Amino acid sequence: MAGMSFEEYVNAYYRGGLDISARYGIRKDELRTDGAGTSDAAYFNTMYGASVFNQLNTKSDVFKLFRKEGWTQSGWRVLTARTVSGSNTGVAEGGAFGASDVPDLALVEADIKEIVSPYTVTTKAAILAEADDGVKGLATFLRAQAAEAHSFYIDKMMLAQPAAGVAGDNMESLYRIVGNNGQLDLNGYDANEMDVYNLDRDAGTSWADAYVNNGAFTGSAGSRNETERALTLDLLDATIQNAIENGAQYSDLIFLMGHQQLTELKQLITKGSGAGATWRMALEAQAPKGTNGVASEPGMNLDGRMGYYDSIPIYATQHMADALTSSSGGSTASMGPILLLDMKELYIKVAAPTTFLAQEDLANVQALKRNYAFMTAGEVICTKFKSQGLIRGLELGA
């Protein structure tokens, strides 16, 4: 598997050419070379799964934004500190080298997360569905609904509230990935709730902390609340500056926000405290730009699909939280957070592309029903936290 492109990995998986394929019921000896299955079930199970994986990569709000890589290993090394300055110095003619040093490295490991969307068709329901007043093609209808739900809930778990507990068997939340030790001081966050992968953020600030631009904290240590503030261009600029200073390139950055935040930003740019700064919205004839195949519009385009701020693409999704835990609004309602993501350092590692599972033999099921499910296995991976940014503690209409 080493050296495979992701396209090669996916094709090999669906053709039963990977060891992991058989573990999810895709076997090479059950697939004919002409594209049809030795059994109809083998062919259609592969086809349905591939169709939903394509949907995930083209029609989802969040999952589609990330590049994908095959799951060839579970761990990766990250640079936690550069070599000391004393080992990188000029040397006089004929002089000795400076002190030898090596950069500090840490091993980060992630587990495969298996996301399953099951559904069942009973024999009675299938019979009644064909009646005059029934839902014709019940199995097809339920399969389509399960496929849509599979895509919807993977997006949703990728933006789950970090204070809802650790990810567990779900894919990791971007809010936790783009989090830090400081958030544990907030009311509503318990120990370990900002831990990510095998990394313990409870011990103190570290290289594993992302940049979080939050409102002022009030209250006692360990149970503080966050005072919300208005969205300003200064907040966006500070977050961009942090990303750039930590090695990110403008071409790798994207903003991810809710439609509520997008509307607020539109109003800020056109008539709020940011009025007069519209030049920063890429008014020039900017070439179409995209992220991992997701196309954008040229120029200033702040619609709900995609726009720009300071040449950085903006994506909007329905899955952004209205407000993160411990935000405390003033006279106006809370507004959801804004993420600035360094996409060079974020990707989804896929162990098993979406697979359709079917258990249709009533004798084996030992019940008058047929069981089905869509399953995708993988995890969201971050190889550098410092260049990721989160703006939280925002007030709507302030």
Image (cartoon, rainbow, N blue to C red):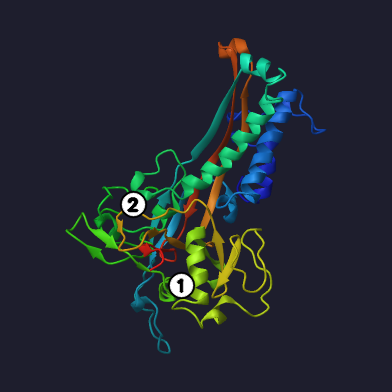
Q: Residues within 10 Å of mark 1 (few under 14, many from 20)?
A: many
For the point 71% across and 17% down, the residue is 131
Q: Secondary structure at mark 2?
A: loop
Q: Nearer the viewer, residue 259 or 392?
A: 259
For marks 2 and 1, the one nearer the N-term is 2
Q: List the residue tagged with mark 1.
A: 240
Residue 358 figure quarter: top right
The label number, if any, that marks residue 9 in the structure image: none
The label number, if any, that marks residue 194 in the structure image: 2
Residue 145 figure quarter: top right
Give the percent coordinates (x, y) of residue 57. Answer: 63, 49
Q: Quadrant of the N terminus?
A: top right
- Residue 390 is left or right of residue 221, and the answer is right
> Label 1 is placed on what type of residue?
Ile
For the point 32% across and 48% down, the residue is 193
Give the percent coordinates (x, y) of residue 144. Answer: 65, 34
> Label 2 is placed on what type of residue?
Met
User: Can you say whether 91 is above or below 66 in the image?
Assistant: below
Q: Residue furthest bottom?
A: 93
In 3D space, how far apart are the residues under numbered discs 2 and 1 (Cα atoms)? 23 Å
Q: Residues within 10 Å of mark 2 (few under 14, many from 20)?
A: many
Residue 10 figure quarter: top right
Give the percent coordinates (x, y) of residue 267. Answer: 50, 71
Q: Residue furthest right?
A: 34
Q: Is residue 259 visible?
A: yes
For the point 51% across and 65% down, the residue is 263
Q: Nearer the viewer, residue 130 or 30?
A: 130
Give the percent coordinates (x, y) of residue 22. Answer: 62, 30
- Residue 276 is left or right of residue 386, and the answer is right
Q: Secondary structure at mark 1?
A: helix
